[in-house]
Image: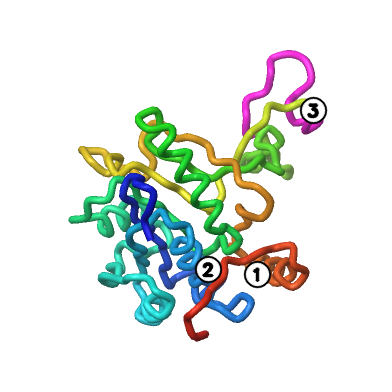
Amino acid sequence: MESRGNPSAVALIPARAGSERVPGKNVRELAGRPLLAYSIAAARESGVFGAILVSTDSEETAAVARRYGAEVPDLRPAELATSTSPDVEWVALAMAGRDEEIFGILRPTSPFRGAATIRRAFDRLVELGERADSIRAVELVRQHPFKMWVLESPTGNTELMRPFVDQPAEGVPYHSMQYQALPPIYAQNSSLELAWSRVLDGDDPSISGAHVAPFLTEGYEGLTIDYPDDFERAERLVASGEGQLPQVDGFPPT
């Protein structure tokens, strides 16, 4: 799979079983295949990874992962598979004893992130070299944080709110400006994260390091399935031909 004399790399696909908003989403079928299969296929087709590992706490998910060509060395311990478990914990566990120079986190919830997307991000990280510890998928926000509010404690019979972002001392408040007048702000999506493995070293390991480069997703690359209606949207995109899924060839359906 790995080619072109690039730094060695491993794909890490997190697929814990305990999704609260969409139960069983990692193995739920989209266009006749489990969601997980598309990230495995994209990683394989990208040609940049020497190994594809799935991190899961579920025997069922592990069986699906192996069926579609990924490795599952061991099940993730339950204490590292809660809804609040930091990613760095399972990543460090997956990378223990490995010597790849780069790891990539490819979440199954981004089925339209294909091989070309991964290659584009990988090539950019390699190009940046020592100037960046990692590269992370982002997109322009639709709901601008300058227009967000925090609810205050009730005062009498009226519950008030305050702007989430401090406002200018004079002039038009940010929350009353047009979107186009506000500074561009980007939100991370779940499409991908690639990092030099050195970010896991030392006393304060992380999955990103201190210097994070942007990877601007295009089209539906950054579409994330987090809610039931996201699945419905993904199905519509596939049916209309607007959304292109990675090809899952040579593997039997579940």
The stretch drawn in magenta includes residue 144: no
SS label for mark 2 = helix
**Amino acid under label 2?**
Tyr
SS label for mark 1 = helix
Would you identify the image quadrant in which residue 171 lies? top right
Would you identify the image quadrant in which residue 188 lies? top right
Residue 231: mark in rendering: 1
**Amino acid under label 1?**
Phe
The stretch drawn in magenta includes residue 176: yes
Q: Position of residue 94 (x, y in %)?
A: 28, 59
- At horizontal 25% and vertical 58% (from top left) the residue drawn is 93
Mark with earlier residue (2, 1): 2
Q: Quadrant of the N terminus?
A: bottom left
- At horizontal 68% and vertical 27% (from top left) the residue drawn is 183
Distance CA(mark 2)–CA(mark 3) = 41 Å
Q: Position of residue 195 (x, y in %)?
A: 38, 43
Judging by the rendered image, the residue that carries numbered circle 2 is: 38
Circle 1 residues within 10 Å: few <14, some 14–19, many ≥20:
many
Residue 146: mark in rendering: none
Distance CA(mark 3)–CA(mark 1) = 34 Å
Distance CA(mark 2)–CA(mark 1) = 14 Å
Which SS type dominates the magenta stretch? loop
- Chain part drawn in magenta: 164-180
Circle 3 residues within 10 Å: few <14, some 14–19, many ≥20:
few
Name the one closer to the observer, 156 or 77.
77
Judging by the rendered image, the residue that carries numbered circle 3 is: 177
**Amino acid under label 3?**
Met
Q: How is the image coloured?
A: rainbow
Mark with earlier residue (2, 3): 2
- At horizontal 31% and vertical 62% (from top left) the residue drawn is 80
Q: Are marks 3 and 1 in contact (CB under 8 Å)?
A: no
164 over 225 or under it: above or below? above
